[in-house]
Amino acid sequence: MLNIREYVKVQSLEEAYELNQKRTNKVIGGMLWMKMGSRNIQKAIDLSGLGLDKIEETEEEFRIGCMTTLRDLELHPGLEAYTGGAMKESLRHIVGVQFRNLATVGGSIFGRFGFSDVLTLFLGLDTDVELYKGGIVPLSEFAWSKRDNDILVGLIVKKRPVQIVYQSLRLSRTDFPVLASAVVCLDGKWRAVIGARPQRALLIEDEENLIGGGLTEENIRKFAAYVKEKTPTGSNMRAGADYRSHLVEVQVRRALERMRGEENAD
């Protein structure tokens, strides 16, 4: 059972940061995962009054506040157009619309959950995390950093030419993914992000330039095998490590074959 002794709707990020330094206080976000656990919280810190629930789009970037809901991400026309539908695809299986109306970007990213579709998708893009005290850091660095008591203010996604295909396999429609992947060509450079390994998502760059000669059958096969080799997998109640490793190769190959016939964004 979750027990909260005091609720505080903060008036500033500084107030939230100061309160969050005490181990028994917690930022609550959408509170969907937190309430499933059993813990005692001295003060629940609510950021909803700080205007951090917006998506701002310019010609250069998207700025996404930490209190933005997953449903807002799913329905944003700019993100839909920029990712060619990959943003919506990464979110549509997350429980249901009611859940996505409450779950926040900040909670999904700050949690660094191994099963996170959200983290997997954003790692494929040129994404930075804005922290109140830590400043702006690449998401790829933040995703593997040790958790601390800083406040995640939001995400910054820079608009660079991108093609991206997102895939996931689930045992049932709203379950956690057995494996998730984003295969991306970002500014002419190829990368794959593999999530739900079941560890947190892993970013793999095409360091050997296996697709430099184009999306031929041989290059597709080589890159899919390369990503499989570079991706450690594990076992849990949903699948074994060997099956996940097989899925890595299959999903990467299918994504590249799809890209060969369509371009998601200029």
Image (cartoon, grey):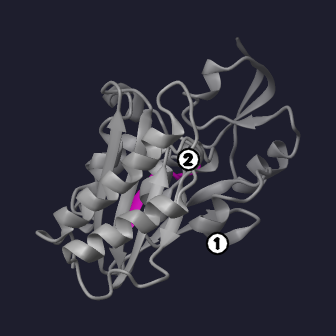
Q: Is residue 14 visible?
A: yes
The local crowd at label 2, few if under 14, some if 14 to 19, many if 20 or more residues have their Cα within 10 Å, is many
Q: Which region shows up in magenta?
A: 49-56
Is-magenta flag for residue 52? yes
Q: Position of residue 102 (x, y in %)?
A: 45, 32
Give the vertical position of 256 relative to 174 (above or below): below
Figure quadrant of the C terminus? bottom left
Q: Position of residue 57 (x, y in %)?
A: 35, 69
Give the vertical position of 14 relative to 7 (above or below): below
Figure quadrant of the N terminus? top right
Please tell me which residue lies in front, 207 or 137.
Answer: 207
Is-magenta flag for residue 180? no
Residue reaching furthest top?
1
Q: Nearer the viewer, mark 2 or mark 1?
A: 2
Q: Which three-letter amino acid code belongs to the residue tagged 2? A: Thr
Q: Earlier in the sequence, mark 2 or mark 1?
A: 1
